[in-house]
Image (cartoon, rainbow, N blue to C red):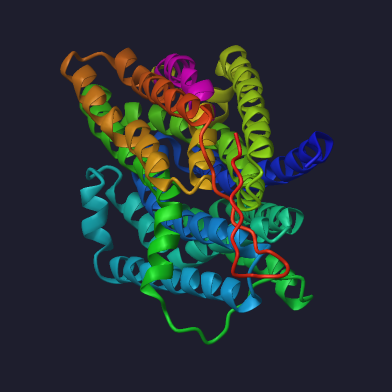
Amino acid sequence: MQKENIRSSFFRYVFFNILSTLGISVYILVDTYFISKGMGADGLAALNLCLPVFNFINGFGLMFGMGGGSKFSMMYCHTERSETDKIFCNSFYLALAVSAVFEVLGIFFSRQVTSLLGADSTVFEMSHSYLRTILLFSPAFVLNNLFVCFMRNDLAPKLAMAGVLGGSLVNIILDYVFIFRLDMGMRGAALATCLSPIISMLIMSIHFITGWNAYNLRKVRPSAEIMKSIASLGLHSFVTEVSGGIVIMVFNFVVYRMIGNTGIAAYGVIANLAIVFTALFTGLSSGVQPLMCRVHGRQDEDSLKYLLKLSVVSALVMAVTAYAVVYFKTEALVDVFNSEKSEKLRKIAEKGLRLYFVFMPFMGINSILSVYFTSLERPFLSQVISILRGTALVIPMAFMFYAFRSISGIWLTIPVSECLTAIFAVILAVYEFKPYETYVYSYNRKDKGDLEQKVIM
């Protein structure tokens, strides 16, 4: 591929995907803003206690979407339509199965889950009201992530973006109506968020109605082999997302014991803003993922490496820009969510933001390299990166700083973990750049039984 064509496709895909992921992150950020205005610091604490459940729900949707979408892209150029339909259908089956589990939790065990998340008597009812509604609508979140990922891989990033942004706009409107006009409290905030992915999927259904789609639901027998392949390719996305939820739970645990509910509220501001800025790198990596998978499917190693270079440079530029915004606008960002003008919350959140957000350049590198290794059909390397940055380094470090009673250390846990993981990931990538033999099999036009081997340096 010509570099000009690669750059054009790269920036087009990345732009629309960043808008999409920012739209998804707005689901929670809008709730954070309206809850802070309507229910104050206790509402913020209750919301932050529920965030890990979002991570688990979205994690499964992303695993089946990114895994199935990657498999779909690799097969898109050289297989029959029936085979790509099998990929989509098996991804859909997996999404339904996981959604059923969340439904059971919402119907029968929502109070137990609320207690497990650490809600005390002050915020228990608010947390439970929000959590139960989210669990009951979990299929909408899982399926929305699945459809968005497949549409990106099916050359429809604009429509995927339109669906996500449309859902986010509805969320903003309904949050205002349900919380302030109808006085529905936390349940209203949750309901507004839950209706957003439904609107998003309705908009994206245009892709199917118009017949633009290269995949469809049909009567396909579930395949354990296909499901295993989908889960393997998407596992790094799942681990990354779920690790975020586990980290929030750990941080809630240690921060509550060091500072109390005000600390959890302050961390809620930090965590929710982090979701938005993290969406930049999620959008970048998910945007370049279809392109990497396709050039790898064509055995075009030069184009793959060029895409990697573009992605890393873009990630670093976005990270520096984003941190500059956080550093110089810290007070303004915190004030948006500090409706009670709590001086204690303000001081904790401002200090935390400036330390915590040092993670961004390292997270950008890790996100890109995870997708790069997945595109090379080396999911194990992606999973190792995800586990290192998600739990293996974060949890021990958080409890170490907790033992020293260092709140500054707690805020630096994520940046240090991301930095160490980035060093490891770069070493892996450099090793991959070394000349190695890749065998490309192509059929001879006269005799399809003959195989030709080419060495690509």
Residue at screen point 45% across, 53% down: 234
Instruction: Kindly report the secondary structure that dominates the magenta region of the rendered protein.
Output: helix
In the displayed structure image, the side of residue 184 where residue 148 appears, left or right: right
Q: Is residue 163 above or below residue 430?
A: below
Residue at screen point 39% across, 26% down: 421
Residue at screen point 25% across, 56% down: 113
Residue 200 showing in the rendered view: no
- The residue segment tinted magenta is 345-364
Q: Position of residue 187 (x, y in %)?
A: 44, 58
Tell me which corner region of the image, top left, top right, bottom left or bottom right, holds residue 229.
Answer: bottom left
In the displayed structure image, the side of residue 412 where residue 296 appears, left or right: right
Nearest to the observer: residue 230 or residue 123: 230
Residue at screen point 22% across, 43% down: 120
Q: Is residue 39 above or below residue 53?
A: above
Q: Position of residue 334 (x, y in %)?
A: 53, 24
Quadrant of the rendering where the C terminus is positioned: top right
Residue furthest right in the image? 4
Nearest to the observer: residue 138 or residue 366: 366
Counting every numbered tag in the picture gives: 0
In the displayed structure image, the side of residue 240 where residue 333 appears, left or right: right
